[in-house]
Image: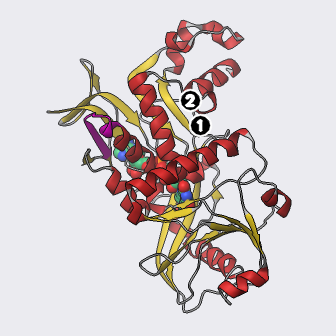
Amino acid sequence: MKTYDFVIIGAGSAGCNVAHYLQKKGKKVAVIDQEGVAGGGSGAAGAFLSPLPGKANPYNTFVNEALAYSLAFYENFAPHAVVKKGVLRIANANFDDGKLSSSAIESRFVSAERLQTLSPNFRKIDGYFYENAAILNPREVCEELLRGSDFYKQDVKELWFEDGFYLFGEVRAKNIILAQGVLKPLVQTPYIEIAPIFGVKIDIKTSTKVPFNIHKSISISTTKSDGTVAIGATKERHNTAKMECLTSCDKCAFYVNTEAGQVETLLREANELIKLEDLEITKVHRGARATIKSYFPVIGKIYDFDASLKKYPSIKNGTKIPPNLLECHQNAYIINALGSRGFVLAPYLAKILGDNILHETSIPKELSSEKLFYKMARQS
Ligand SMILES: Cc1cc2nc3c(=O)[nH]c(=O)nc-3n(C[C@H](O)[C@H](O)[C@H](O)COP(=O)(O)OP(=O)(O)OC[C@H]3O[C@@H](n4cnc5c(N)ncnc54)[C@H](O)[C@@H]3O)c2cc1C
């Protein structure tokens, strides 16, 4: 039997970043995933690291703080896997020129004429250029993050807790962290309602050199060192009530039926921004992002909803019971709902969660599992 301080379920961006953080702090960490490393949503990701423009509000302030932290982290940790050439944002229905130009993040306007001097393949577009943006190789980054931790390929069907340890075959740990993305949670957390947003990203070869990332409703990457360009990503919400599961397996209609239409959409929208010549699709990636209603991700302890309400039924009427008195699944933590920005958010969240577990530092309210627990408890 091999004993670890932490077992993390899920080797996506969330799990790998938390593993790296804890391992660097001297903890013995194992990561388990049924698919291999970055086999879920993370393997399908852009992975574009872009600022969120607009007047400062709690959500874009959080995203932009996370971006600054994560960019510095990746540039230091895996410089070869990061291409940082900025992003040109073109106005769209959600971000009109007013929003882009009055953004809390510094940008500069680039005219259509100026773009033509950079590449005659640019269509008649103009936009706002943000310096602090990049693209990563998601799989390479996840694999590197796991150096120093042990990896086990295993489908964990249920949690087994005995004598103070969680058991996974020949592996055991005192603490577990669930970083499961859209897959069925191993612990009932009715207050964290994960909804998947499915999407397709493609890698292409083209003779057109793309000088920086371009973003409108879809994103086109700058030409990477291997000559490829990534175009991503489509966004498709499914009626989760009708879905048998949220998995990324071949039983899901999305994975069976929708590829051709989605690839067409990506190519059409990309070609409205820049003419991509001698284009050849080299790979199509499909995956699902985990989201919750608030858009914020969720980290923290895993509260036992039913047991806590049984112990303190007055929570339903608004009585304030301190979180340390709630019933928790012992030494179990969650990191999930990273949405469409998993690579932007994960290093930042890993630090906040890691410090919370190791040093009991606080978790900002809007990110905490505790907040979601109380919200649902008071509505029930
Ligand atoms: C098409 C697409 C494009 C995207 N583009 C970007 C982008 O440009 N920039 C960006 O920052 N983000 C992007 N994202 C979002 C990003 O990929 C996600 O936010 C991020 O991958 C979430 O990581 P995760 O670790 O939470 O989940 P995942 O990567 O889905 O990892 C969860 C893992 O848990 C494993 N697992 C779950 N349950 C079990 C179990 N019981 N036993 C064993 N293993 C289990 C799964 O196999 C899976 O590998 C994109 C996502 C998609 C789908």
74 or 287, which is in the foreground?
74
- Amino acid under disc 2: Pro
Which class describes the residues within 10 Å of circle 2: few (<14), some (14-19), or many (20+)?
Answer: some
Reply above or below: 282 against 132.
Answer: below
Q: Residue at x 54, y 68 (%)?
A: 201
| Rendered location of residue 270, percent (x, y) | 65, 77
Q: Residue at x 75, y 41 (%)?
A: 57
Residue 79 falls left or right of residue 216: left
Reply above or below: 10 against 303.
Answer: below
Which class describes the residues within 10 Å of circle 1: few (<14), some (14-19), or many (20+)?
Answer: few
Q: Residue at x 57, y 23 (%)?
A: 370
- Under circle 2, the secondary element is loop
122 or 327, which is in the foreground?
122
The circle on residue 193 is: 1
- Under circle 1, the secondary element is loop
The circle on residue 295 is: none
| Rendered location of residue 30, percent (x, y) | 27, 40
3D distance between C-alphas at marks 1 and 2: 6 Å
**Residue 216 counted in the magenta span:** no
Which quadrant of the structure image shows residue 10? top left
Q: Quadrant of the C terminus?
A: top right
Q: Which residue is mark 2?
A: 190
Q: Is mark 1 in CB contact (under 8 Å) with mark 2?
A: yes
Which quadrant of the structure image shows residue 258? bottom right
Q: Which residues are magenta?
A: 22-32
Q: Quadrant of the N terminus?
A: top left
